[in-house]
Image: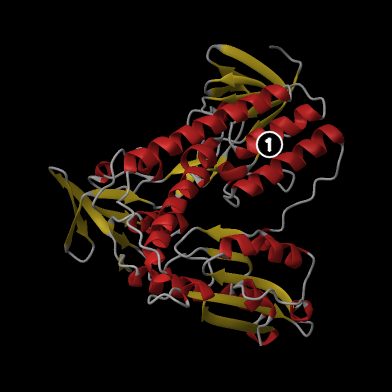
Amino acid sequence: MARDIDWLVIGGGSGGIASARRAAQHGASTVLVDPGPLGGTCVNRGCVPKKVMWHAAQLAEMLADARGYGFAVDSGGLDWAALVRKRRDFITRLNGIYDSNLSAHGVHWRQGHARFVDPQTVEVGGERLRAKRILIATGSRPSWPDIPGAEHGVDSDGFFDWEAQPDHVTVVGGGYIAVELAGVLRGLGSQVTLLVRGERLLRGFDHDLAAMLEETMRKDGIGLRLGTTVEAVEREGDTRVLRLGDGSQHRCDALLWATGRQPEVEGLGLDAAGLDLEQGRICVDEQQRTQQPHIYALGDVTGGIALTPVAIATGRRLADCLFADQPQPTIDPTLVPTVVFAHPPIGTVGLSEEAAIELYGEAQLRCYRSRFNALYFGVLEHKVPSLVKLICVGDEERVVGLHTMGVGSDELLQGFAVAMQCGATKADFDRTVAIHPTAAEELVTLR
């Protein structure tokens, strides 16, 4: 394979595959390099298998609620091994679909690890590939704490390798991965402790969402400890013993690190490509170009918004620009919708109240909130509260932030994100006829 490659894509995750397929559709000779299995973190160790586990936890909660609706239900307990087997079978089918789709669009997949030999040449398994343009889309990997005994825990990748359900799990971290996996494990019946270094959950999300999530997790029986650091870990048989920053000890059966992610650049040979890193990430401009005008990068490896749909949209737009001479619109980071699959889920798009105050000033803002119990809980003894919140700016009250937490928040968000993309105002929401009885109607009836 010589100089006739138009588009050489390093990384078979969501962004890399999307860009490779789109380029090939435009007639570009395209090669994708990835060690496999195809699909990257999202398909193999992230969004998709996580959502399967979240659905399982959701079903467990609904089984517990069924008696409140008059059903004589005995779940019989969870067969963890069966759930893991079905999840893995599903992911394997997805890997095959990705492979078939690449072939169908004329993308050549070279299975292996890529390493730059020079700015236009990549070596894969002893074979050298030269290309006119190169895309780096290698994603990210979990970060580990630099403390003695950290190896006695696992990261989010290791969570999906568990063959048996642990009785008592300690999750360390306060971001969305930590709260999602803590919620899944608690919903499936494990005793869960969540250790958070900071004084709140979900840094960067709206404070009302973080506060209600903390309340809900505690109510669900998760042992939440804020302002807590882990200094060292030891192992005593099957037990992990954590030495905490306050001098105390904490014991558990399994330890899961959810302390962030970092760009996956190891082994790429970026020096040979003439590329420098900044804080571990590959720097790009608004058109995804690196220091080398023919080398591009996108997705988690650039330290941008770490969301699959953002990587897909960026990859497709880049291919459209390079190989179909189409405009390359940028993504407004303030209008990217995000869901945290907590229990219940969180949906958010736009600015948090804190960010809006910083950008516009408190005098320009008006916030509307409603806290309520969804109808689902009307006949149940236990209640899980819901929250909706609008943040509006200026005399026209343009909606710049929309935040929800509660049953159905994950599904209702997409349509409201479209409205915000179109510049919707509070008056537009007010003129919209509500769908009753739903949680979504609360967003168009706020006063």
Name the side, left or right, on which 149 lies relative to 218.
left
Name the side, left or right, on which 429 lies relative to 191.
right
Against 387, is 149 above or below? above
Q: Whole-percent x and y of residue 64? A: 36, 63
Residue at x-position 42% and y-position 67%: 201
Q: Nearer the viewer, residue 140 or 435?
A: 435
Query: Does dot 1 land on a helix, a strand or a loop?
Result: helix
Residue at x-position 60% and y-position 34%: 275
Q: Nearer the viewer, residue 400 or 169?
A: 169
Specify the quadrant that holds the C terminus.
Answer: bottom right
| Visible residue check, residue 107 | no
- Residue that extends furthest to the right in the rendered view of this protein: 325
Q: Whole-percent x and y of residue 130? A: 68, 18
Which residue, given by chain and number where applicable, does mark 1 sit on?
Answer: 18
Q: Whole-percent x and y of residue 380? A: 41, 75
Against 386, is 270 above or below? above
Residue at x-position 50% and y-position 76%: 208
| Visible residue check, residue 178 | yes
Residue at x-position 76% and y-position 42%: 317
Specify the quadrant that holds the N terminus.
Answer: top right
